[in-house]
Image (spheres, helix red, strand yellow):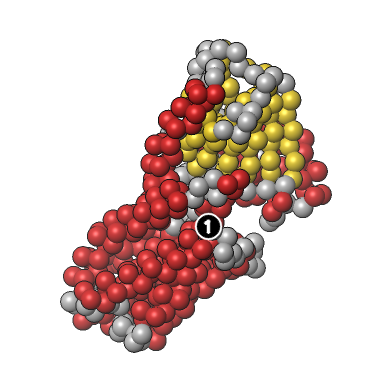
Amino acid sequence: MNRFCSTLAALLGLGGTSAAHAHDPGISTAQGQLRADAFELTVGFAPADAQQLLPPEARTTGKWTQAEFESARGPLEAIAAGLWELRAGGVPLAPRETRVRLAAGDSLNFRLVYPRPSTGPVTLRALKLGALPPGHREFVVITDEHGMALAKKLLSAPEPAMELSLPAEATDRAAGAGAAAPPTFWGFLRLGVEHIWTGYDHLLFLFALLVVCRSFRSIVTIITCFTLAHSTTLALATLNVVNLPSRFTEPAIAATIVFVGLENLARRGGEPPGRWALTFAFGLIHGFGFASVLRELGVGENGASIAMPLFTFNAGVEAGQMAIAAIVLPVVWRLRKNEKFVSRGVPALSLVVSVAGLYWFLERTVFA
């Protein structure tokens, strides 16, 4: 029994992090523009992330209302100047203007206006990434006064800074934009891997599907159907062909987990017939969850190409998914050779899956 409990804990270790971060650790954006006489930086935070920037006594619950925003305006304006550090030639520049406003979707936008740097290199450092949930990323795009990209980078707490070379001519600007592409490619690839590794609801859903598979063929079919489905809606949602708000998508993802866990319980460890079709249908819902990451980063806006971010992000998701499967599946495959595991262990695991899914569903609906 002790051995079974240890195995159960190991298998569920992928969900051991706090349920408060059951899906994505968060993404914020920063858009900078180099103007003739100033450097403007607009930083956007989702409601839950903006709460983390405030002292505990100033935080509100749920979504931001206009009244809640007005009551928190003072503390928010107080932290605005400390969100970023801007250095030109090693000399820090203080913002000459800061502003905070409540934007669409209850997100918060901070606008920081600095004097235009006259010497380079220019270093930008996000100072608050360490105060946000582990794994939080900030996607930064810097443009010149004509809207041409000068630099792009995905920042994190371990890597919170980026450098910007001041262009002197249009040709230099074009070269600077081209040089920014490779970090963006690898940034989106890494973002895909980290998103699936920290997407405990996605992983738990996939685990619940695979734990009842009786053959290698079933495993391949399930993974293939899930991949095809979420890749389809990821592409369609990023292209804005089909779109579902996260307030519908996130509870629906939790509901798929509850359903699969209960179906496993009803079959008492056996593999339900037609599971591949269910996997494909539910995989479409999970794809909308993946797409929310790219939409939050503004992929495809203002005529920007989506091919590279879409391909590399999805490739990162698949790479992360296969890495987890390579670790978990051999353990599950070995355990399924034990009849007690099939008759008792699988139902016990499925019950845990259902309870976790129900918790996330309530968290995203009743307690949202």
Say above or below: 225 vs 297.
below
Rendered residue at 21%/81% (across/down): 339
Kind of residue at badge 1: Thr
Q: Is residue 51 above or below residue 19?
A: above
- Residue at left 77%, top 52%? 65
- Marks counted in the figure total 1
Relative to 249, is 319 above or below? above
Going by the image, does 68 lie left or right of 282?
right
Q: Can residue 314 be seen here?
A: yes
The extreme front residue here reads 171
* Viewer-closest of 22 and 169: 169
The N terminus: image quadrant: bottom left
Q: Is residue 117 above or below residue 314?
A: above
Provide residue 144's location: percent of width, then percent of height: 60, 28
- Return the residue at label 1: 238
Q: Nearer the viewer, residue 274 or 7?
A: 274
SS assignment at label 1: helix
Residue located at (45% from left, 76% from top): 281
- In this view, the residue in front, 147 or 48, is 147
Q: Residues within 10 Å of mark 1 (few under 14, many from 20)?
A: many
Given residues 12 and 317, the one toward you in this image is: 317
Residue 352 lies, in percent from the top left, at 41, 71
Q: Quadrant of the C terminus?
A: bottom right
When asked about the image quadrant of residue 80, the answer is top right
Query: Is residue 55 among what the camera can see?
Result: no
Q: Does residue 48 appear left or right of residue 337 in this picture? A: right
- Image point (49%, 50%), residue name: 306
2 sits left or right of 83 in the view: left
Q: Position of residue 204 (x, y in %)?
A: 40, 66
Residue 221 on image: x %, y %: 29, 74
